[in-house]
Amino acid sequence: PTTADPTEIRMLGLDDKFLSQAKLMKGRGCDVCGGTGYKGRVGIYEIFMLTDEMQDLIYKKVAAATIREAARKSGMRTLREDALRKAASGITTLSEVIAATVGDVD
């Protein structure tokens, strides 16, 4: 287990609730992993469900921000949200979340 670095907290906009519930981990590294502390890869996913509402918005050629907002309301998780869930579960690290994702645009 590890604690979040203040810079990572600021960059990711993490709140006290997230930090108190998260099981943050950081690998020690070994000869097998080349000192990285990582073993294998874990995917992060942003799945967009094409509902009738989404299809209608696309056909109407509304702004991408409007489609994204509707998708979020329908339950879509962003790449960053999925990565943060995995970091909170100890599957990856906050530094990898920063490296692999960009901030969410609201």
Image (cartoon, rainbow, N blue to C red):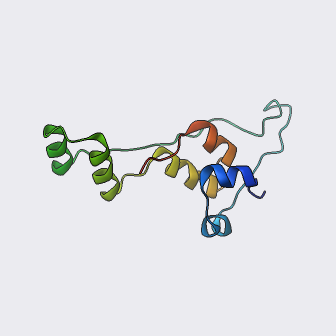
Furthest residue toward right: 31
Q: Nearer the viewer, residue 19 or 13?
A: 13
Looking at the picture, how far across and down is residue 47, in whole percent?
Answer: 37, 44
Above or below: residue 96 compared with residue 84: above
- Position of residue 51 in the picture relative to residue 80 (left or right): left
Looking at the picture, how far across and down is residue 59, in whole percent?
Answer: 13, 38
Looking at the picture, how far across and down is residue 16, in whole percent?
Answer: 64, 68
- Report whether residue 93 is seen: no
Q: Nearer the viewer, residue 5 or 75?
A: 5
Residue plotted at (17% across, 37% down): 61
Q: How many marks?
A: 0
Residue plotted at (69% across, 43% down): 95
Residue plotted at (72% across, 38% down): 38
Q: Nearer the viewer, residue 29 or 61?
A: 61
Assign the N terminus to one quadrant of the image.
bottom right
- Position of residue 43 in the picture relative to residue 70 (left or right): right
- Report whether residue 97 is seen: yes
